[in-house]
Structures are given as structure tokens and as C-alpha cells.
Image: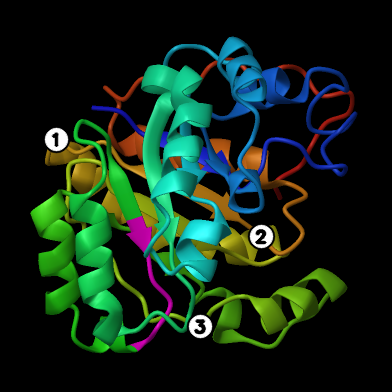
Amino acid sequence: MRLHVGCAQWTHKAWQGRIMPDGDKLRSYASWCNAVEGNTTFYATPARATVTTWAEQTEADFRFVVKLPRTITHDRRLQHAEGELRAFLHAIEPLGSRLHALWIQLPGSFAPGDLPALDRFLRGLPAGQRYAVEVRDPAFFTDSAPLEETLGRAGAEWVPFDTTEFFRTPPTSAAERDAWAKKPRTPLRTRALTAAPIVRYLGRDDQARTVEGWRRWVDAAVAWLREGRSPTIFIHTPDNADAPALARRFHAEVRARVPELAALPDAEPMDQPLTLF
């Protein structure tokens, strides 16, 4: 039984010298959180040597959820991308057991009619690895059975991106206005398909709103842990300025209800105190 928590990135200008010390950014981040979204791989396949340094900077129990490159998911739409996939899998191999799941984020134009392509792609992936799929088309949420069946055949998870709290009221900051134009408005989904559910949650720049909006996910994480599952929860806010501290707070709220849950590592000290209320 394990709860992983993390953020959308392991480095952020707003964190340096305030939430975590300057210097070795991934190593510092990994003292705050025990998981991270690998969003940079969406834009380009990293060098294998670079990935080796990621593994060297993290403990064995740290976890990466690594996004497939957009050339595979968006440009090729999961078809005729065998070469790109082989190159990507070779590049991230040094992560070893730190690779928690391969994250297949599909474009909003990927609709239920495209499920045969997803089914073929999932069946062609190597065995022995976790796979997690994120969809944006609202039609998948209206009738979830076909996608659940496709994912079930491959033992893959459905990754919800919960933006419901964010879109509940109009934006009040520049970062929120930017996110308002870019983030997907997907229906809420709280059902897990596998023993390792993954959730992406977007709050607000107002920390109290963020905490209030994640109550359902605290309840879900507690229930999943009691069922023997090991969830991973990623905390986002529009500016992400306090995301690592918020992720730790989420873990603490769950652990208060599941005391047998292992504690997070001691965070590297901040240069100045961070107040979460």
C-alpha cells in the first residue's frame, strides 16, 4: 500500500530559494514529493544519458509518470509510430522501477470512433509495464463502457484530469485566466480500473479553494488504499507556485485517516517559511 503525490514538474522558478533550495532541482524536488509528471517528454524524446541522471538523482521508491511524445499521440495518432515508440522506450529504460506508468495523453479530437487505433496500440506495447490513458473528448464520459473495455483488455488505467473546481467560478488572476483558456473542461470521473489509479487535480491559486476542492480525492484515496490499491495524485494550480507543499498537505490529510501509510521523506528546508493558510 503506497500513496504517491507530486506535481506537473520538478522545477519552477517560483520554488527556487523559497520552497526548496537552489541547486540540484530534481534531487530537491524528490525530497518534497515521491512522484512527478514527466511532461517534458511530450515535446521531445530525451537522451538516454539524461534519463540516467534522473534515476541517479532520485531514490529507488520515487516514481515517474512519463508522457509519450506528441509525435506518437497527436501527430501519428497512435498509428505507424513503431520507430518513434522504440526510440522512446529505449531512452527511458534507465528509469527501471522508477517508471510508474507510461502516460498516453490523447488530443481532444481523439473520439470514441478512434478506439480501434487505441486498442491496436495498447496490444502492441511491451508487457510488464503500466499504461495510463487520458482522454479529452466529452463523449468518452457520456458512455464510458467502450473505453473501459478497451483499457481493461490491456490492464491500463484511465487518468482523470479533474478541472471541476477550477471552472466552478471565473478566474481571478493572470495565471487563472491563462489556464481558463487552455485547460480542458472534462466531466468528473472517480472510478479506478486498476490497482494503481492516477489522478490529476487542478485547483485554484487560492489555496483554500484548492484544498476544499480536493476533498473528494482525499476520500477516494483513502478508499482505494483500504481496498489495497496504491494511488498516485498530482496536484496542480494555475501558477503552481505552492504545488509541492500542497502535494505534501494532501498526503498528510490522507495519512491522518490511514495512519499505517508510510510518511513522505523529510523535505529539504526552505530558505523562508511557506504558509498554507
The magenta segment is: 133-138
Asked whether 119 falls inside the magenta stretch, the response is no
Label 1, label 2: how far apart the Cα atoms are: 29 Å
Q: Report the side of 254 relative to 23 (left or right).
A: left
The dominant secondary structure in magenta is loop
Q: Quadrant location of residue 101? A: top left
At x 44%, y 68%, the residue is 106
Q: Earlier in the sequence, mark 1 or mark 2?
A: 1
At label 3, the amino acid type is: Arg
Bin the neighbour count of mark 2 within 10 Å (Cα to Cα): few under 14, some 14-19, many 20 and up. many
Q: Secondary structure at mark 3?
A: loop
Earlier sequence position, callout 3 versus callout 2: 3
Name the residue that disc number 1 marks. Answer: 228
Picture coordinates of residue 94, whole percent (x, y) = 49, 18
44 sits to left or right of 21: left
Label 1 Cα neighbours within 10 Å, binned few <14 / some 14-19 / many ≥20: few
Give how far apart the Cα atoms at labels 3 and 2 are.
Answer: 15 Å
User: Relative to 194, is 129 above or below?
Assistant: above
Nearer-the-camera pick, 269 or 163: 163
Q: Residue 237: which disc? A: 2
User: To which residue does mark 3 refer?
Assistant: 185
**Percent position of residue 108, x then y:** 48, 80
Q: How many marks?
A: 3
Residue 100, given in percent of the width and then of the height, sits at 37, 33
Q: Secondary structure at mark 1?
A: loop
Q: Earlier in the sequence, mark 3 or mark 1?
A: 3
Tell me which residue sits at (42%, 50%) in the image.
Answer: 103
Q: Residue 89: horizontal and vertical position, in percent?
A: 43, 34
- Amino acid beneath label 1: Gly
- Residue 168 appears left or right of 170: left
Q: Amino acid at mark 2?
A: Thr
